[in-house]
Amino acid sequence: MNNSRVLLILIIVVLIFSALVLRLVNLQVVRSDELSFFAKRQQTNTQTVKADRGFIYDRNDVLLVYNRNDYSFFVDLRMLPASEKDRLAKMFSKVMGKNKLHYSKLLKASGKTICLEKKVPFEKSLDLFEYKNPAFFYVEEPVSVFHYGSLASHILGYVDNDYKGVSGISKSFNDALKGKDGFRMVERNAMGDIISISEKQTRPSVPGDDVYLTIDKRYQAIVEEELKQSLKLTSGESATCIIMNPNSGEILAMANISDYDPNHFWKYGDFERKNRAITDSYEPGSTFKAITFAALLEDKACNESERINVENGVYKFGNNYIRDTHKFESLSVRGIFEESSNIGTAKLIQRMSDEKFYQYVRSFGFGTFTSISLPGEVTGKLVDLEKWTKQTKTYMSFGYSISATPLQLTNAFCAVVNGGILYQPQIVKRQVDKNGNTVREYSPVEVRRVISERTSERMRSLLLGAVQKGTGSQAKIESLSIGGKTGTSKIIVDGKYSNSHYYSSFIGFYPTENPTIVCYVLISKPKGHYYGGLVSAPVFKNILTRIYELEKGKYDQHKPNTDIKIAENKYQSSNYEFVHKESKHANELNESRNVFAADNNQNLMPDLKGKTIKEALSVLNDLGIKWSVTGSGVVAEQSIPPGQTINKRKTCILTCSQISTTGARIY
């Protein structure tokens, strides 16, 4: 019996040993290659090394968009003990500030791997890194950070969760900004931790290029603040503003309100996210008269002094009536423009053929793309010439029967006042790689000459009159030479022109003698007052006033153009007009200005005789004294004698002798 038991045990041992040998042969010999493959795949893998996106700056090298590495946290529920779920929920609740129940529900979910939090900032992640468990792991996630939130959001665009630019510059320059991803071969232990990295099988990522924009962050902030304030005052639906340098096509600011925060783009709808300055077109109304009159003057179809019968405000044209807001029996051509007479404009445009007017409108860039480096631009609508009716030209002359984007109108207006050259709008100045090498420099692009310099000069005079004496008077800024044009147009609702919804706009420029800034303001659906001169012109005034104050000390006064006279269809001014002039000594002038202020007793009027106008006005501004200037050159007389106690309610009148002066300019 004992021998039988020994034999049975021996047989069992032999069978077990044989089974082990067969198993080892199967693992080590038969399936050796297969198992080695799976082992390597489990222990080693290739990781993508995401490239850092390039930064975005404004024209003054102010950083607008940069990157940071956030972290997403995951847990493998198959490996997480039930006892750890409550602890993990408490920790995330404490760090993230969310209810513990939120995480408890996530940890009770059915599935393999769940995400507890996505893109947690590094500062908060530090506390979460301390938790150690084989089931708990995290992944590094690069994120684009828009430093000033909603500022310039429609220009900058946003970057989605896949680190891809979706709109704005982030999209149109995505290939340049995104860089080139790298990779690395890593080896992990049984717990999943990285234990080594193969240098031979590593390719580093290449960061994206940096993009420098033409916009000025300071101007952009002013524009957005004023637009928001305007919507509060007018209860409007939305507002748009564009500031351009007419001599280069550079956009200094572009804003739409309502806007959005690109850091949280998913919280907003399409209306807030789209750049309505280039994606939405509208009938511009009377601002388009600047284009019409430029064409009329260029074609020699009228002169500023001739008078036109404007029918006391009501004119039957075909089967329709054209009406003016103000009733006049007759107006000069200049008066028609200043008072924004639809009737006068309609009569004047009959002097030009349909073909000729179409050519001018097309040459100013309407009905086509401006080719700005931003996605989503539309062409507006310019009816094909062969489809024109008898009314098309007439209604188009005062801004109906044509639709345009705010950018198209602003760009065309720049050509009206800059000497007659249409430029391609420019939003990017240069592209620079991470080594500081310039990849591409963007220079102004002249599209075509539209009108002559002489016509442009005459148009600047008309636009000056529209502000000084006409419908744009609310845009007037004391002591600054401003020109511009108002616009009011009805909005089409359900295929018909509404009698309660309007677009109110104003477009202006400064200074009239040598324009360096064009500013366009559009308010949609204001409540109460809806005329552009009452709604949008004050917004223009506020914006330009703040920009002028911001650049205080960089502007200089200039002797008036004595050739401009009202009787000769130009404007005469006894005061100085501010113009921009370049100076290599701008900093020295600013420093000397402070010296002048410091030398004076703040309670006594200083002696200003012999000083340049710039020096004298710097002193008066620092002392808070109101002033008025006649003449040009240096101060010869002052109405408040030197040494007299200052009364800030009085105005100091400076009489100057004739000499030329120089100064500094902003651009």
Image (cartoon, rainbow, N blue to C red):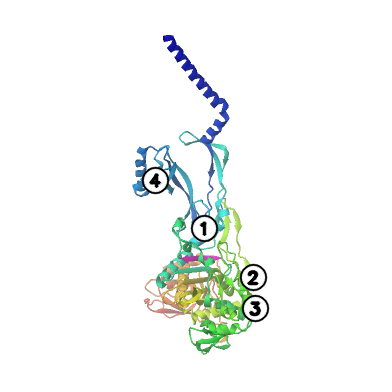
Q: Earlier in the sequence, mark 1 or mark 4?
A: 1
Q: Earlier in the sequence, mark 3 or mark 4?
A: 4
Q: Is residue 132 above or below residue 156?
A: above
- Residue at position x 50%, y 87% from top? 313
Q: CA distance from mark 1 to mark 3?
A: 43 Å
For label 3, the SS is helix
For label 1, the SS is strand
Q: Position of residue 545 (x, y in %)?
A: 46, 71
Q: Nearer the viewer, mark 3 or mark 4?
A: 4
Q: Nearer the viewer, residue 390 or 181?
A: 390
Q: Which mark is residue 448?
A: 2
Tell me, yes or no, whether the two marked residues, 3 and 4, touch with CB atoms within 8 Å. Answer: no
Which amino acid type is shown beneath numbered disc 1? Tyr
Residue 430 is one of the magenta-drawn residues? no
Q: CA distance from mark 2 to mark 4?
A: 63 Å
For label 2, the SS is strand
Q: Position of residue 563 (x, y in %)?
A: 57, 82
Location of residue 411 by image quarter: bottom right
Q: Which mark is residue 57?
A: 1
Q: Which mark is residue 226?
A: none
Tell me, yes or no, whether the two marked residues, 2 and 3, touch with CB atoms within 8 Å. Answer: no
For residue 329, say whether it is visible.
yes
Q: Which residues are magenta?
A: 250-257
